[in-house]
Image (tube, helix red, strand yellow):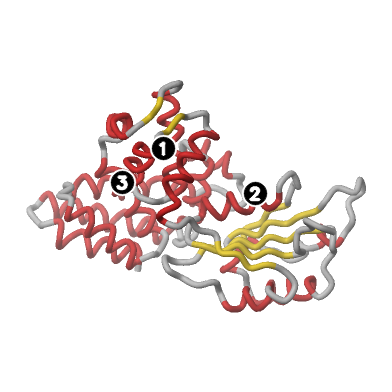
Amino acid sequence: MAGRRPPVTLLWGEDAYLLREAALALLGATKAAEVDAGEWEGGELQGLATPSLFGEPRALLVNDARSLRKETLEEIARYLEAPDPDATLVLSCIVAERGKVPAGLQKLVEPVGEVRKVDIAKKELEPWLVAKAKDHGLDLAIPGARALVETLGPEPGQLVAALGQLQDVFAGQRVGAREVAQQFRGLGEQKTWDLCDRAFGKDLPGAIRSLRAIEEGGDDALMVLGGIAARLRDLLKVRSLPDRMPPAQVAKEAGLRFDWQARRYQQQAKNFSMAQLVSLHDRITEADRALKSGATGDVVMPTLVTTIAG
């Protein structure tokens, strides 16, 4: 049948927000069961193989597919030997910056399904942002989109969150570079967000590049350290919550503003045990004491960032 989805699709890329968006677009109106790879218990594929009582389409979305265990991959491989043509399996896989699709997943999916890279080319980011703004009911001009990217960086999820702020402030107005500058004067704070995402995401090369950009911009090391400490406190709250708690509830319990933020923090918190997070809190306290005692940021901060991301 024309337009039929393949039985399995592997979506891979560097950005969690884009992967989520691509997965939901692929599924359309189909209500999918959802599981994180690290929480796979076995038997999750039974829902795909068992026809629905009322004939509804069936789907399963697997997040962080890179973390699937060997036995789970074998279970998926057995299912894909004779997949149900009316069911959809979506594997979502985040890779490191400039990373490649995991060969094992690619080999598993290619014979029977589709492997798709999800990203936005740099030259397409501004038009994409303008279109997203329109979906939010916001009239964003190209110069405004350019200013937003220059101010906040190229991370799609963070940019989309910023559109909500602009809509709250400039509803019914055309938003250009001037309005963006008015709303987002705290450039150092946004750079620190990027640093935290990379460091707690275990992207050491990216975290070091982000730290160097902050240092070149002349941002105060104590202010950056404060941002890292705030992120760690949020991760401690998230790590203390049940792993299977829905993102909306995580956001509410941890005092986060967005569901996507809760998902990201859940992913970052899984990179650490609670004991490791507590230990990092002690390291941040030591770094704060060192900076206030006269140590320079170019000595203290790389060591701390390496401890977190490494």
Residue type marked 3: Glu
Q: Tag 2: residue type?
A: Leu
User: Which of disc 2 and disc 3 is earlier in sequence?
Assistant: 2
| Mark 2 or mark 1, earlier in chain | 2
What element does badge 3 sit on? helix
Q: Which residue is mark 3?
A: 150
Residue 44, quarter of the rendered image: bottom right
Q: Is residue 75 visible?
A: no
- Residue kind at label 1, given as amino acid type: Ala
- Identify the residue shown where x is 31% and y is 46%: 150
| Residue found at x 28% / y 63% | 208
**Circle 1 Cα neighbour tier, 10 Å, few/some/many (<14 / 14–19 / ≥20):** some
**Most extreme residue toward the top, as rendered?**
172
In the image, taking residue 243 as reference, residue 306 lies left or right, namely left
Dividing the picture into quarters, in which one does residue 212 lie? bottom left
The residue located at (71%, 51%) in the rendering is 27
Q: Quadrant of the C terminus?
A: bottom left
Q: Nearer the viewer, residue 307 or 35?
A: 35
Q: Which residue is mark 2?
A: 24
Q: CA distance from mark 3 to mark 2?
A: 28 Å
Check disc 1 and report the residue beneath it: 162
Locate residue 195 relative to residue 114 in the image: left or right.
left
Say if 204 sits above or below 133 in the image. Answer: below
**Closer to the camera, 51 or 123?**
123
Q: In this orientation, which residue lies closer to the viewer: 277 or 50?
A: 50
Q: Secondary structure at mark 2?
A: helix
Q: Secondary structure at mark 1?
A: helix
Disc 2 from disc 1: Cα separation = 21 Å
Judged by depth in the image, the label closer to the viewer, 3 or 1, is 3
Q: Residue 109 location in percent, x, y?
A: 69, 72
